[in-house]
Image (cartoon, rainbow, N blue to C red):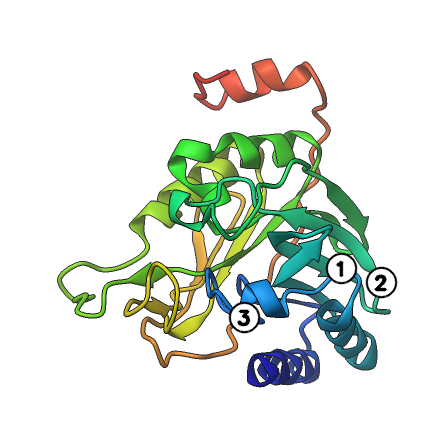
């Protein structure tokens, strides 16, 4: 956990010096997704773990989105925080569409929220919250007015996965493209890398492939694949104004070919 937090602090420093205004970090960056150590190491938010990320954001004057394991009244949540450039937590999201295999560890979130920032209105969700079968979560964030959705992730494959034969990431591109095209928003999903050493997916690996999709549904950037493919990927995004609100979305979405609720 100490190495992971130090790595996150280092990436925040590098991103700031590179000229980035916001950095998105992976899901459960402290303990690792579904690692049982969360039962002992999860901390309250605000608390020891989030305080370090807030301090790094303040020290280097950059906004940070980060996935952390959160302890609250005896329950553990797979959470993500949005921290501004002076170290304040603007919002906290608790993952809603948690995989069944993780239900014995993480409790389910019950709130969606957005934050108005100098970069535009930002929404945060986590990994499987953007499954094609759970896009309602992204739809709600977009209809609340978000221009940018940032999503800490843990994208995993089996140890022997052949990425040449089966390139990773198609499902995420499909989901991100649909939401971005419909609402004119930008989505960024960032996955950690490395071997999963404990928990229900022990022996699998998380492999990066971080993804940014722009308002027309175009891929703006995609990270490298692999359990050692740690990297800082920079991309230029801009909030696109959107005047539609409330019931106006019915016609707005119909005009874009959307046939859902």
Kindly state the secondary structure of the residue where label 1 is placed. loop
Which residue has dot 3 on it? 31
Quadrant of res 108: top right
Which residue has dot 1 on it? 45
Q: Quadrant of the N terminus?
A: bottom right
Residue 187 at what x, y percent from top left?
54, 50
Q: Earlier in the sequence, mark 3 or mark 2?
A: 3
Circle 1 crowding by C-alpha within 10 Å: few under 14, some 14–19, many from 20: some
Q: Is residue 28 above or below residue 214?
A: below
Kindly state the secondary structure of the residue where label 3 is placed. loop
Residue 35 at what x, y percent from top left?
46, 66
- Tell me whether the residue at label 1 lies in contact with that at label 3, contact meaning CB atoms closer than 8 angstroms: no
Whether residue 92 is visible = yes
Which residue has dot 2 on it? 88
Q: Earlier in the sequence, mark 1 or mark 3?
A: 3
Q: Residue at x 47, y 45 (%)?
A: 103
Foreground disc of the pair 3, 2 = 3
- Left or right: 202 in relation to 230: left
- Tell me whether the residue at label 3 lies in contact with that at label 2, contact meaning CB atoms closer than 8 angstroms: no
Q: CA–CA distance between discs 1 and 2? A: 12 Å
Residue 208 at what x, y percent from top left?
40, 68
């Amino acid at each position: 956990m100490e190495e992971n937090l130090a790595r996150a602090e280092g990436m925040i420093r590098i991103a700031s010096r590179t000229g980035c205004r916001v950095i998105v970090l992976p899901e459960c960056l402290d303990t690792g997704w579904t690692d049982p150590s969360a039962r002992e190491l999860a901390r309250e938010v605000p608390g020891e773990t989030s305080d370090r990320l807030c301090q790094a954001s303040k020290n280097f004057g950059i906004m940070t989105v980060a996935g952390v394991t959160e302890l609250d009244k005896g329950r553990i949540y797979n959470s993500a925080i949005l921290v501004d450039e002076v170290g304040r937590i603007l919002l906290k999201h608790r993952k809603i569409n948690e995989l069944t295999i993780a239900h014995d560890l993480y409790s389910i979130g019950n709130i969606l929220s957005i934050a108005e920032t100098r970069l535009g209105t930002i929404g945060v969700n986590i990994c499987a919250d953007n499954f094609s079968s759970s896009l309602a979560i992204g739809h709600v964030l977009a209809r609340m007015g978000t221009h940018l959705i940032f999503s800490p992730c843990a994208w995993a494959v089996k140890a022997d996965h052949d990425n040449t034969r089966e390139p990773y990431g198609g499902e995420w591109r499909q989901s991100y493209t649909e939401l971005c095209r419909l609402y004119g928003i930008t989505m960024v999903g960032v996955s950690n890398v490395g071997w999963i050493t404990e928990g229900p997916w022990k022996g699998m690996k998380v492999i990066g492939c971080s993804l940014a999709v722009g308002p027309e549904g175009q891929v703006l950037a995609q990270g490298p694949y692999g359990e050692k493919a740690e990297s800082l990927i920079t991309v230029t995004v801009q909030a696109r104004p959107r005047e539609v609100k409330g019931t106006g979305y019915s016609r707005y979405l119909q005009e874009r070919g959307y046939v859902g609720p």
